[in-house]
Amino acid sequence: MRITGNSLTRRRFGAIMAAGLLATGLGACANSDTGSGGGGNDDGKIVLGFSQVGAESGWRTANTTSIKEAATEAGIELKFDDAQQKQENQIKAIRNFIQQKVDVIAFSPVVESGWDTVLKEAKDANIPVILTDRAVDSADKTLYKTFLGSDFVKEGRLSGEWLLEETKSATGPVNIVELQGTTGSAPANDRKKGFAEAIAANPNLKIIASQSGDFTRAGGKAVMEQFLKANPKIDVLFAHNDDMGLGALEAITAAGKVPGKDIKIITIDAVKDGMQALADGKFNFIAECSPLLGPQLMDLVKKVKAGEQVPERIETQETTFTQQSAKEALPNRKY
Ligand code: GYE
């Protein structure tokens, strides 16, 4: 509705002004409540602003649960924002956290590039930043305190090394298709790199198609359908996460092929559904990537807030699974 000058009576104008003043007043109050010079809440609780990538995969859901539970456990007040896989939303959330004067900001950057400006703003406001799960490519390492997460290159390399061993007696070409994670994200870049480096040892192993499925089941299914249409002979699928592999399963079965046999499937993460597919013989190998970063993150938040030194890189410990070891591990999986 358009409000014209005529229709805006004096009384209504007065009411709007009053509401505006009230809102500004409340805003200022809210700011000073959480602010107090970066010194946390009135009740002394540490306030952590966390910007999450989204809810694209089983891994992400488990990661969010871990962070929320660990914050409660540690008595840290969590301001949680879901960026729905968009960098602009993450930048907005970080700016909001700065404005609210939270004590510490942590985030899992959806892509690697383009963070320098907003990280500089946090630094200028004296708010320490912790990177979790995914890295940024900023040259200035003083823009953040530490990076907690997995070695994605290693996950790609372990996947490639398993395939090398598995195909060592192959005499002809082995055709591989690759489902990449979110374009520009650290795990997509690094897993691709590690895998390519490992399989380079055998010239029979060839990546004949490689495209992003955005780390989602729907993306994995849609891209695998295209791969199957365009390539009559696919021997191996390397998917950058379980969810895309699970989506691809549907496309493979619909195309009349047997997953795990006609097409060998390698994925990364080892979330429950992925582990089940592996135990059922539909996947062939998974490199684990642990989403349970919450407790370590809260520990770092406390240390950083207290001004303690923390290591600049903390690497998550993980393993790999075959069909047999997945069967054994499955009953005790936490995610
Ligand atoms: O592998 C994938 C998720 O950044 C490690 O993001 C994470 C990745 C994970 O969507 O499933």
Image (cartoon, rainbow, N blue to C red):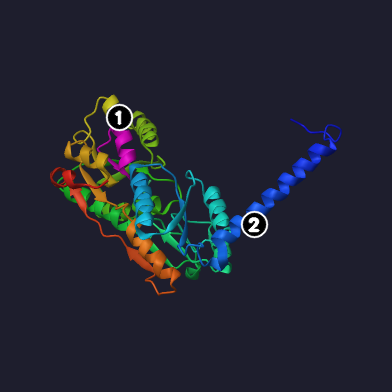
Query: Residue 120: in sight, yes or no?
Result: no
Q: Position of residue 218 (x, y in %)?
A: 39, 33
Viewer-nearest residue: 182 or 5: 5
Q: Which residue is labeled 1 in the image?
A: 250
For image coordinates 19% across by 48% down, the residue present is 321
Q: Which residue is labeled 2 in the image?
A: 28
Viewer-nearest residue: 63 or 17: 17
Of circles 2 and 1, the one toward us is 2
For image coordinates 37% across by 61% down, the residue present is 298
Q: Magenta stretch: give its range.
A: 232-252
Identity of the amino acid at label 2?
Ala
Ligand 1 near label 2 (Cβ, under 8 Å)?
Answer: no
Q: Earlier in the sequence, mark 2 or mark 1?
A: 2
For image coordinates 37% across by 71% down, the residue present is 311
Of helix, strand and loop, which one carries label 1?
A: helix
Q: Position of residue 229 (x, y in %)?
A: 35, 28
Determine whether, in the image, residue 20 is placed left or right of residue 41.
Answer: right
Question: Vertical placement of 45 versus 322: above or below?
Answer: below
User: Dot 2 surroundings within 10 Å: few (below 14), some, or many (20 or more)?
Assistant: few
